[in-house]
Amino acid sequence: MDNWVIAMMLGVSIFLGAIALFAFLWAVKNGQFDDEEKFLNGAKFDGEDELNDAVKREEKKESLKRKYKPE
């Protein structure tokens, strides 16, 4: 192999790795991995009514977070 082929492959792999790192950091920043209670809620709330109540509570909590603006 020529040196330019190795350099091109190294450059492309660093570029793709940087894109993957950027995408991962963006996902972490935007809360894509913040569902720590998913499996706990599945065990706590077995029935459909309990699950619907849990969803309503979470929606209410999120709406209160959005409305809250400290002075």
Image (cartoon, helix red, strand yellow):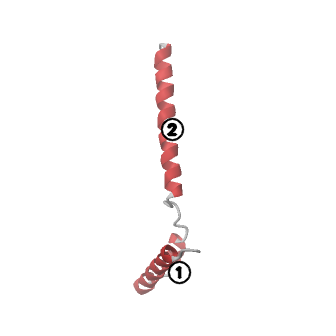
Q: Amino acid at mark 2?
A: Gly
In percent of the image, x 47 and y 81: which residue is there? 60
Q: Which numbered marker is on residue 17? A: 2
In percent of the image, x 51 and y 38: which residue is there? 17
Residue 37 at x, y = what percent?
Answer: 54, 71
Residue where numbered disc 1 is placed: 44
Contact? badges 1 and 2 (CB < 8 Å): no
In percent of the image, x 53 and y 64: which residue is there? 34
Residue 53 at x, y = what percent?
Answer: 44, 85
Residue in front for this viewpoint, 49 or 17: 17
Mark 2 falls on what kind of element? helix
Quadrant of the frame with the C terminus: bottom right
Label 1 packing within 10 angstroms: few (<14), some (14-19), many (20+): few
Task: Tell me the quarter of the picture where residue 49 sits.
Answer: bottom left
31 versus 41 height, above or below: above
Residue in front for this viewpoint, 43 or 17: 17
Q: Residue furthest right?
A: 71
Residue in front for this viewpoint, 59 or 68: 68
20 versus 65 height, above or below: above
Label 2 packing within 10 angstroms: few (<14), some (14-19), many (20+): few
Residue 63 at x, y = what percent?
Answer: 46, 77
Tell me the distance, in whole angstroms, between the alpha carbons under discs 1 and 2. 40 Å
In front: label 1 or label 2: 2
In percent of the image, x 46 and y 23: which residue is there? 8
Q: Amino acid at mark 1?
A: Lys
38 versus 31 height, above or below: below
